[in-house]
Image (tube, grey):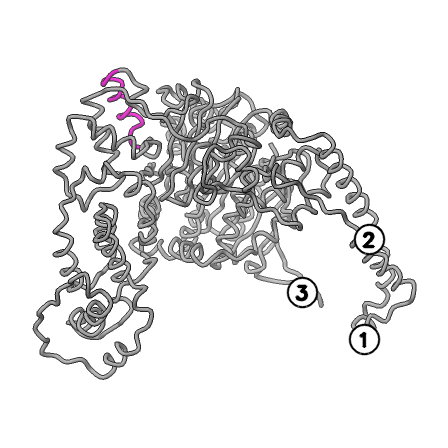
Amino acid sequence: MEEFKQSKLSKTEWISIEQKLDKQEIIIMNIIKTGYDNVLIQHNTHVSLNQCIKIDHKDYHYYIYVFIIKPILKKKYKKYDLMELKLKSPKQKLNNADKIRIQNIQNIETSIEFIIMDNYKKLVKSSKVKYYFNILYLFNHYDINIHFKDILLKHISNYSFKPNDILLNCNEVIENNSIFDYKPIELHKHQKDIYTTLQENKRSLIFYTSPTSSGKTITPIGICQKYKVIFICASRHIGINLAKSAINVGVKTGFAFGCASNTDIRLHYFSVNSRTNDKYKNPIHTDGSKLELLISDIHSYEHAMNYMLSFFDKENIILFWDEPTITMDYDDHVLHKQLSHIWKINQIPRIILSSATLPNDLQPIIDNYKVRFEGSFYKIETTDHISNIILMDSSNQIIMPHNYFGSTNEIKIFIETKGPSYLKFLSVCECSNYILNSSYKDKFNSLSIKNIDSHKIKLFYYDVIQNELFKTTSHTNYKNDTMFTTKSSCSITYGPAIWIIDDVSYYTNRLISQMSIQPSILEQLDKKITYNHNLNDKINKLKKDYQDKIAKDEGNENKMKNQRFSPEVVQLSNNIEKLEASFKSIQLDPLYIPNTYEHYSRWSCLENYNSSNVFKSEIDEHYVNRIMNTNVDFNYKVLLLLGIGVLHKNDIIFNDIMKELADSKYLMLILATSDYIYGTNYQFAHGYLSNIKHITQEKIIQSIGRVGRKEKNKSFTFRFLDAYYTELFFENKPSKEGKKMNELFSI
């Protein structure tokens, strides 16, 4: 597979690791970095007035209420009849500095207190449980002014909402509620656990398991605060993303990609410790004494290990092995020999095996490790109950345990073996409906409403189905077919989709044929592409001639600045400009581009385009020109004009463009094989699984994990287009990956 290639970083990849993360991602990376020494670290996405104004007074709540909150409530929220509190003045008065701070406070109405007031206004107007829930949620997560809180609690006590009201309105209260964007940013539990475990400073083998998108692959950034880390990954894209994140927060990073020896290792310039003494001052990459993180492909691990051991004691190094189950679903694979070799020759006594789906029965590996390194074994495992991912079968029905299993005994076995790890795959709205239709609804109503969340709903659902089992029917409005260039494109909402298939070429051709586009249009498009491609070749040759002719003048600064060249060179420059102006515009009519207004109007049965949330591609002329100048098949180019990307095994340039587009969420859909799921960290809103002959339960779980990776307050779907996948998903048998890992890693 292209993603497992063992080669040095390309120019495009070097450029990508220098890209700046956005402000929010920088905050997250810094929390992961500093969290190693303080696992309780938090960053509030918003601030309360207590945090806005730093008053050095024990009764600061009183003064913030009296001088800031009370006047605004009286002036702007008078009609809501928020009574004034009669409070006794503190004996200690405010000092002048604190008075000035209060007088100069700005952006008051962006504070959490006034976001709460906005929800209170909506509650009064609509009497919806959503806004009642939102107020309680913000009270639970922020340090709210106590007097303001007292006022609001007294007023909302007039509303008699109960937990069952949340179940009845689950879609807007739990599944699609933007209030969860206000949750403070903090370490995931698995990150807290692994940092705490490593603080014990023992030789250890750690099985590190948590759902995809929960930050496992960026955890090494924090570990680097104490240890040197060798991060090994079969998928180079994961390693490159880690490098980008690490470099953005100052972690000294190097690369062991496509190495034939230690001398092939390359350091990022922040990590360089020494340079040559000549005028060029080139970095000496063989000096890695400042290195903190070395990212390695499978092929290069031995060189990476020896390189690090030449500078650091093995007791101060951690081998962080990302997704060790890759290729373990094959009876035989070209990587197996190399994977086994890594385990056999490894000298690093602290090892972390990190995956979303580590098999359960790996005791032979644990025993082998203990014999070789005399270390301890730890298992760190967490679950995801926040993501809202709806699993759908081929008949558009939502997949739930109560509809799949036939008896409470089967349910109990399922919950015992897979229950916690499958919480992520439960539709919280389906859980809510099931509880409401059971005899346990009154018991749920006795819970405290302020503590209700998706986790509690799902766990309560598990309790119910173990004691009261019945079938339900719940279809979705999504079209569960793959006519992505025509009638099914409107099912792709909020963000891009991934379609996992075996034969990419076959389905590429099928998508083109579905368009029902006139052959003459494609012929004209092909002619324009060919014309531009040939024109680009001519321009490149002329540019080379131009550079050759001006090379002798590069040392003459004035001549270069004033462009005082010979008539021959000037003519050459003019010819280049004329040719560049003659490129033909290459685009398709919006009628053919999925999820444009024109396409939507033609194919969709839904009425309002603006409220449909359909997702369409955004590919500008710059990308179009780059795509058309690659050497891939014509149909691949047409699909990319439609916003559909295909991983092409033979053209690195085309793949790089596709990855750039996917990373920026410019593509509507990506076609990929089941191996590609390990090579993408992109955020998909929907996933489709069909026509895969070679797949296991763990690969299905990995596939689902590509969906809904960052956003937690929207409805995402993953669609099984064959009943066989549902059976495999719930199967309770030893995994093929576990058997193969034991075979290769217990030598």
Q: Residues within 10 Å of mark 2 (few under 14, many from 20)?
A: some
Of residues 184 and 314, the one nearer the viewer is 184
Magenta-colored stretch includes residue 511 = no
Q: Earlier in the sequence, mark 1 or mark 3?
A: 3
Of residues 56 and 722, the one nearer the viewer is 722
Q: Nearer the viewer, mark 2 or mark 3?
A: 2
In the picture, measured across the screen, residue 162 lies left or right of residue 257, that is: left
* Residue receiving disc 2: 579
Q: Amino acid at mark 2?
A: Leu
* Residue receiving disc 3: 281
Per the image, label 3 sits on a secondary structure element best described as loop
Q: Which residues are magenta?
A: 407-420
**Percent x, y of residue 587:** 68, 43
Q: Amino acid at mark 1?
A: Asn
Q: Is residue 348 among what the camera can see?
A: no
Which residue is pictured at 61% across the width and 48% down the height?
13
Q: Quadrant of residue 377?
A: top left
In the picture, measured across the screen, residue 528 lies left or right of residue 608, that is: right
Which residue is pictured at 44% across the width and 57% down the height?
26
* Residue receiving disc 1: 558
Q: Residues within 10 Å of mark 1 (few under 14, many from 20)?
A: few
Q: Amino acid at mark 3?
A: Lys
Per the image, label 2 sits on a secondary structure element best described as helix
Q: Nearer the viewer, mark 1 or mark 3?
A: 1
Calculate the distance from the C-alpha at mark 2 to the C-alpha at mark 3. 40 Å
Magenta-colored stretch includes residue 409 = yes
Q: Farthest residue in the bottom direction?
A: 96
Which residue is pictured at 32% across the width and 40% down the height?
175
Per the image, label 1 sits on a secondary structure element best described as helix
In contact (CB < 8 Å): disc 1 and disc 3:
no
**Percent x, y of residue 295:** 53, 46
